[in-house]
């Protein structure tokens, strides 16, 4: 029996991950800070992972064979420099040590492309990291402990899709344009690897279900300019005239010219898996927000 | 068939490792810079691993399923700050990439306790590294690439035994005392983890033959003061009166109060393995130097 404990299971990526794991035959136990409504097929554990008691309870109540550690501070506009990143690093390393001591066979921690920091081209497993944010630094410190312990560590690039926090780029673009308002953004020449959230979920499940250890990028392997992404979504909404490129200046990480992934390592465990991809993902995102904003869900 | 390529196979640890691997049923291919006399049961490949051609040749000539990468600059008094450390880091990371591309299933890189740098107590897999030597920094950079790629990485503490370079502590102590000369050393209160070279060899073979990835300390798990080690060897030679503790000041890494290993992770793969240990190892070292210095071998 494969029994997986998923932290952050009620979050943006976590809620897409639960069905992906069920589809691979895992018994899924999801941790969230508050009690969650029963999601078909998963068992929910309320626990605060920033406390020792919460971490101990999550492991002892689920007795997992596998662990996916997704939980972390992720509030837009806040997560990059919030001091709570330090607490999440310490809690995550302690969770790893407890899971190892409990004999959890497969452990996968989830990090971020922000661990790489400023780079000139696609980042791969050998790229030396230079994180420029507290979030990136804390995730990297956690990564080092996970891979030193022989666990796997996935670095998520730019996920998008249903349940994405509203203040992030694509949701705020959709909401602004649907309200008939002008969307001010930067020049948009920055290159990014956008990956649909259900594709990330399938990648995480495939890595967990493999024997891959060390670092693996979780990304599409395709780079797009923010300009092309914004234009694509705006066109779907028939509202390209409302977008004002160059209306604001990008700063910090948002101004990085390129955040791109080498996905050759990932492909070793996802070869043959179907993916939804950017265009279909964008269509689903627009449809999901349409339902939500019109009050039909 | 388990076929292992061992780099640095003619060195101090490498020559002890070859029989340990043969004993586990490996077909052993040893790389050395120059052609080596046939060692019973092993195939020798002359190659300079600091060249691309040498690395490509070593892999293509042996087509290994396993790789143990021991080769590095190790000359006493020289290796800690020699710029060649940077070349060894780059060559080692390239060797890793080539081995991965060739489908080598198990890769074990060998590093050093000097990656940890200055620490207050035993170093374990989660200890944050602060190397103070160029050697430690270069090994650490290599370690990061190896574990990111899902390989294993062993950190050797203080190995001693036959074939140890003459300028290191125990050989120079034995040679000096046997010559009837005074041995000047520091106060000797520094704590170290000494491990007999055949024990390290068995540990390396056990890690390679397991599915352990990430970092693992290669050590005895016992700390001894340099004073007790020196006194033990001097007593065996009946020459304690020739040792002058405090006769010189230790500096740099040699002055570190404690370099100790947490070996719980190692024990998971070496439980039940017989070990020679310090006292018997010291006796064998003294006997080996006695034979060598008297010209009988």
Image (spheres, coloured by chain):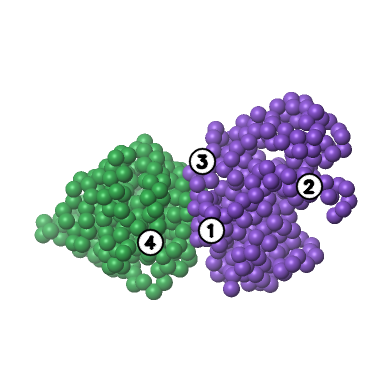
Chain colours: A green, B purple
Q: CA distance from mark 1 to mark 2?
A: 38 Å
**Which residue corresponds to mark 1?**
B151
Which corner quadrant of the image does residue B10 belong to?
bottom right
Q: Quadrant of the C terminus of chain B?
A: bottom right
Q: CA distance from mark 4 to mark 2?
A: 52 Å
- Secondary element at image label 2: helix
**Which residue corresponds to mark 2?**
B287
> Looking at the image, is mark 3 or mark 1 earlier in the sequence?
3
- Name the residue nearer the viewer: A88 or A122: A88
Residue B269 drawn at (x, y percent) = 52, 55
- Pointer 3 with pointer 1, Cβ within 8 A: no
- The chain to which mark 1 is attached is B
Instruction: Please give the label number shown on residue B25.
Output: none
- Name the residue nearer the viewer: B272 or A241: B272
Q: CA distance from mark 3 to mark 2?
A: 39 Å
Residue A104 drawn at (x, y percent) = 38, 54
Dot 3 crowding, Cα within 10 Å, few <14, some 14–19, many 20+: some
- Secondary element at image label 3: loop
Residue displayed at 79% across by 64% down: B36
The correct choice, above or below, for A286 with respect to B230 in the image is below
The correct choice, above or below, for B291 with respect to B60 in the image is above
Q: CA distance from mark 1 to mark 4?
A: 17 Å
Front: mark 1 or 2: 2
**Which residue corresponds to mark 3?**
B128
Report the side of B198 relative to A249 (left or right): right
Dot 1 crowding, Cα within 10 Å, few <14, some 14–19, many 20+: many
Dot 2 crowding, Cα within 10 Å, few <14, some 14–19, many 20+: few
- The chain to which mark 3 is attached is B
> Looking at the image, is mark 3 or mark 2 earlier in the sequence?
3
Residue displayed at 58% across by 52% down: B154
């Amino acid at each position: 029996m494969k029994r997986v404990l998923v932290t952050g299971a009620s979050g943006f990526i976590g809620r897409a991950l639960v069905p992906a794991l069920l589809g691979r035959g895992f018994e899924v136990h999801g941790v969230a800070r508050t009690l969650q409504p029963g999601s078909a097929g998963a068992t929910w554990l309320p626990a605060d992972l920033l406390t020792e008691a919460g971490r101990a309870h999550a492991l002892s109540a689920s007795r997992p064979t596998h662990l996916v550690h997704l939980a972390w501070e992720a509030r837009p506009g806040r997560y990059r420099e919030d001091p709570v990143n330090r607490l999440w690093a310490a809690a995550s390393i302690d969770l790893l040590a407890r899971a190892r001591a409990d004999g959890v066979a497969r452990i996968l921690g989830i990090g971020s492309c922000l661990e790489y920091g400023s780079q000139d081209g696609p980042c791969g497993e050998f790229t030396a990291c230079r994180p420029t944010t507290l979030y990136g630094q804390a995730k990297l410190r956690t990564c080092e402990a996970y891979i030193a312990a022989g666990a796997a560590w996935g670095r998520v690039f730019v996920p998008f899709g249903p349940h994405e926090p509203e203040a992030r780029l694509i949701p705020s673009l959709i909401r602004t344009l649907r309200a008939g308002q002008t969307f001010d953004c930067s020049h948009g020449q920055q290159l990014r690897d956008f990956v649909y959230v259900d594709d990330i979920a399938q990648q995480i499940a495939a890595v967990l279900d493999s024997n891959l250890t060390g670092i693996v990028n979780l990304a599409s392997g395709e780079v797009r300019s923010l300009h092309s992404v914004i234009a694509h979504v705006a066109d779907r909404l028939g509202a390209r005239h409302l977008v004002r490129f160059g209306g604001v200046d990008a700063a910090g990480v948002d101004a990085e010219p390129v955040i791109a992934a080498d996905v050759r390592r990932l492909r070793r465990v996802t070869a043959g898996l179907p993916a939804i991809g950017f265009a279909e993902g964008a269509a689903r995102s627009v449809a999901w927000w349409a339902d939500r904003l019109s009050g039909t869900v």
